[in-house]
Image (cartoon, rainbow, N blue to C red):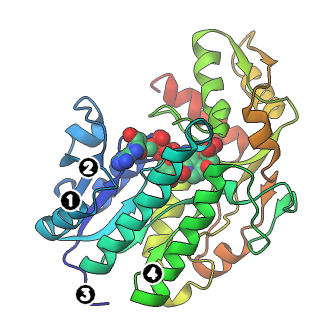
Amino acid sequence: MSDPLGDSVLVTGALGQIGTDLVDALREKHGKSSVIASDIRDDQGHPSANEGPFVVLDVLDTDSITKICKDEGIGTVYHLAALLSATGEKNPDLCRKVNVGGTVSILEAAKQCSLRVYSPSSIAVFGPDSPKHAPQVTDLNPTTVYGETKVTGEALALEYRRNYGVDARGIRYPGLVSYKAPAGGGTTDYAVDIFHSAINDGHYDCFVRSDTRLPMLYMEDAIRATISLMDAPSDTLGKSRAGYNIDCLSFSAKELADSISKRVNNFTCDYVPDVRQEYADSWPDSIDGSIAKMEWGWSPEFGLEEMVDAMLDGLSGN
Ligand code: NAD
Ligand code: SER
């Protein structure tokens, strides 16, 4: 591939849960005017839209993506636009269209404009036949449409690297816990919603069983992991570059509720599983991040107790 057009950065899906924190961190790193936030929604009250450049952009519109990249001298795209698992299982056709079609659009633009791409994958690539402590390399047989789109996304990123030299990288994010934006329609949303309910109502009806254990990560660590991966020299990254497992937390819904109870007086939690239990049960309890650690030095900083403190402080405005 030839040199990128410029040093500016485009973020798709920038008004979502991750975009809210990532745009902020990228603007801190590269300067406000160098980071263009975009989303299919317009919300001028959102910090990604009003604290720096913002455009309304549908990720299925390859021509507009290519035009913005050429006009604005974009060198790197952080491609966050997608439908998450719970929303995706309700709208499987739209989920395939946006998640796979959007990734193809971004990779096509990358091919034409010599862009580097960050395109996240997910623990949803694993299925019920994966080991409960999921290794980096294993058969990937997800039972959700969302998971299938993430397996396809990893394969597309590797294909564009092999065939066109596109430098596309990704992390299999665990469930992400943050306070600046609401969670966006996933199965792991309970680990975010529980904090809002604890503070506002003193009670949470959790939509998975108390013993449901999943890989999770506090957003500050997720942003650090994302930027570390994109800063890593290309030649240090191996075959997992499109979807790294990363070391992260692993806690049950009850362990999370108990940790909140220690800090929020009289907080109670009931467990009322719905269809999302099925998706959670198909995913691993924890993941092995040793390849990410070896290739680009990743290790998390926030344990469960630090995360709970940070969430309660963040939501209380401390
Ligand atoms: P989110 O749902 O909070 O945000 C996604 C954003 O994409 C939304 O603002 C939405 O308006 C936008 N969008 C939807 N369709 C679009 C389109 N056609 N064009 C442009 N924008 C569109 O999601 P998120 O939690 O920020 O996740 C971002 C990425 O990270 C996704 O690929 C997701 O699969 C992945 N991921 C997230 C988590 C998590 O826990 N949040 C875990 C694993 C992987
Ligand atoms: N947090 C995401 C979801 O639950 C996992 O990719 O959909």
Task: Evaluate if marks 1 and 2 touch, with contact meaning CB atoms under 8 Å apart.
Answer: yes
Query: In the drawing, what numbered circle is on residue 64?
Result: 1
What is the quadrant of residue 265 in the picture? top right
The answer to whether the residue bearing label 3 lies less than 8 angstroms from the nearest atom of ligand 1 is no
The Cα–Cα distance between marks 1 and 4, rounded to whole angstroms, is 20 Å
Residue marked by disc 2? 57
In the structure shown, which secondary structural element does the residue marked by tag 3 occupy?
loop
203 or 135: nearer the viewer: 135
The x, y position of residue 274, in whole percent, is 76, 26
Give, as a three-letter code, the residue at label 1: Ser
Point 56% across, 44% down: residue? 84
**Horizontal placement of 80 versus 77: left or right?**
right
Labels 2, 3: front one: 2
Residue marked by disc 3? 3
The Cα–Cα distance between marks 1 and 2, rounded to whole angstroms, is 7 Å
Give, as a three-letter code, the residue at label 3: Asp
What is the quadrant of residue 165 in the picture? bottom left
The answer to whether the residue bearing label 2 lies less than 8 angstroms from the nearest atom of ligand 1 is yes
Instruction: Inspect this view and state whether residue 4 appears.
Output: yes
84 or 228: nearer the viewer: 84
Point 49% across, 72% down: residue? 169
Instruction: Inspect this view and state whether residue 175 appears.
Output: no
In the structure shown, which secondary structural element does the residue marked by tag 4 occupy?
helix
**Horizontal placement of 157 versus 165: left or right?**
right
Which comes before the other along the chain, label 1 or label 2?
A: 2
Residue marked by disc 4? 160
The Cα–Cα distance between marks 1 and 3, rounded to whole angstroms, is 21 Å
